[in-house]
Amino acid sequence: MKALHFGAGNIGRGFIGKLLADSGIEVIFADVNDDVIRLLQEQKSYNVKVVGEKVNRIEQVSNVTGVNSKDENALIDLFQQVDLVTTAVGPNVLKIIASTIAKGLVARLEAGNKQPLNIIACENMVRGTSFLKEQVFQYLDEKQQQQVDALVGFVDSAVDRIVPPVQLDPQDPLLVTVEEFSEWIVDKTQFKGPIPKIAGMEQTDNLMAFVERKLFTLNTGHAVTAYYGKLKGYQFVKESIEDPQVRAFVKAVMEESGAVLIKRYGFDPQAHAAYIEKILARFANPYLVDDVDRVGREPLRKLSYNDRLIKPLRGTLEYQLPHQHLEQAVATALCYRNENDPQAQELAQSLTQNGVINTLEKYTELQDKTVIEQIAQAYQQLAA
């Protein structure tokens, strides 16, 4: 079996690419990074450092190679050969690669390849593959869309593994460090043909429960740890979560978002409380040096209607649940400042020029005036 994976960065190599290769699948990484692709082509392997409370080991990933994403013709040719396409490029890049994927699918159809193909976007977003499908279908006519629908599965997934950037090792430039914990859950109802056997890929017919569990817990907690930690002058997630005040606040936020999950999906309260504790322990992993600016970057995306801060807050309003800490969490995000982040600069500019209320209404799309005013008051207290 052969897979084309878009994105040869830390997550691509350390998470999805590793799981595929470990399952005996030949992996072809597509990326614009000339040096990384050259090394993958030359070495056909790379090392992954797996770290945890009781784990610190190097694992070799083999049977891999690379193709430069700038060589579109080479990518299109690969679509006639592969059985699986995966991505780990970031939500914003999905739009960019959609046209290439569309051309590859058309070439596959024109070559008469009737074998099922599955595409899985392994991104930090809700229903990322469905979004990718929408983008791809913009480049296909109606007949091509029908043909693709018959043979190509666009499989949504939920992914969870902390893969922080690390200092480049000149002796081993492809080395990537990952936490021991990983979770890759796919919607088994969306596959075309037999579901590939991939160790570490879990199947479900209720994906949204796991998508939102991860979004409302890991993503919400991670962002809040970064925003509150930066507000208190910390540089790293680990030192932020070790501050008792930060930890207590982050836990309280995740308990409010967790109440939504328990109400919506019937999660066991004790099991979810244990899941929250596991997440908090992962943030404190001494082997993962994760910068608060990396985790907090792109605050406007994280403040959007269906993302990690506003969506759980909306859930508490839907079920009439407590949401004081989630309101304060949104306020900490409004405080995020980073001169190297265009979204952080846009946020700061909007707050200055348009005020807190208008900024919240524009970027969060919240409708509840009382909640907006309470967030604004919390922000003004923090800013003061």
Image: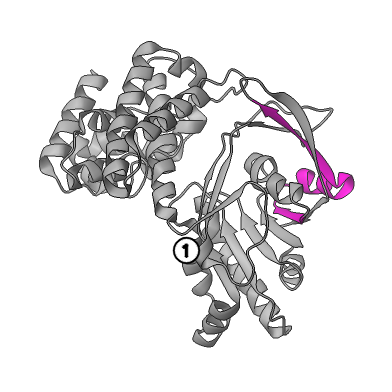
| Residue 29 is covered by the magenta coloring | yes
* The residue positioned farthest toward the right in the image shown: 42
Q: Confirm whether residue 132 shows in the render.
A: no
Give the magenta-colored segment's residue range: 25-51
| Residue 261 is covered by the magenta coloring | no
Q: Nearer the viewer, residue 131 or 33?
A: 131
Query: Residue at left 44%, top 55%?
Result: 207
- Disc 1 target residue: 130
- Left or right, 298 with reference to 329: right
Image quadrant where one finds the C terminus: top left
Q: Quadrant of residue 381?
A: top left
Image quadrant where one finds the N terminus: bottom right
- Left or right, 8 with reference to 164: right
Query: Residue at left 68%, top 40%?
Result: 14
Label 1 crowd (10 A; few <14 / some 14-19 / many >=20): some
* On screen, residue 351 above or below 208: above
Amino acid beneath label 1: Ser
Query: Residue 273 in the image: x percent, y percent?
Result: 37, 29
Q: Quadrant of residue 352?
A: top left
Q: Quadrant of residue 303?
A: top left
* On screen, residue 125 above or below 347: below
Query: Residue at left 57%, top 78%?
Result: 148
Query: Residue at left 66%, top 43%?
Result: 9
* The residue positioned farthest toward the left in the image shown: 370
- Left or right, 27 with reference to 238: right
Q: Confirm whether residue 204 shows in the render.
A: yes
Q: Nearer the viewer, residue 211 or 92?
A: 211
Indicate the secondary structure of the residue bearing disc 1. helix
Query: Residue 196 in the image: x percent, y percent?
Result: 67, 61
Q: Nearer the viewer, residue 247 or 335?
A: 247
* On screen, residue 331 above or below 207: above
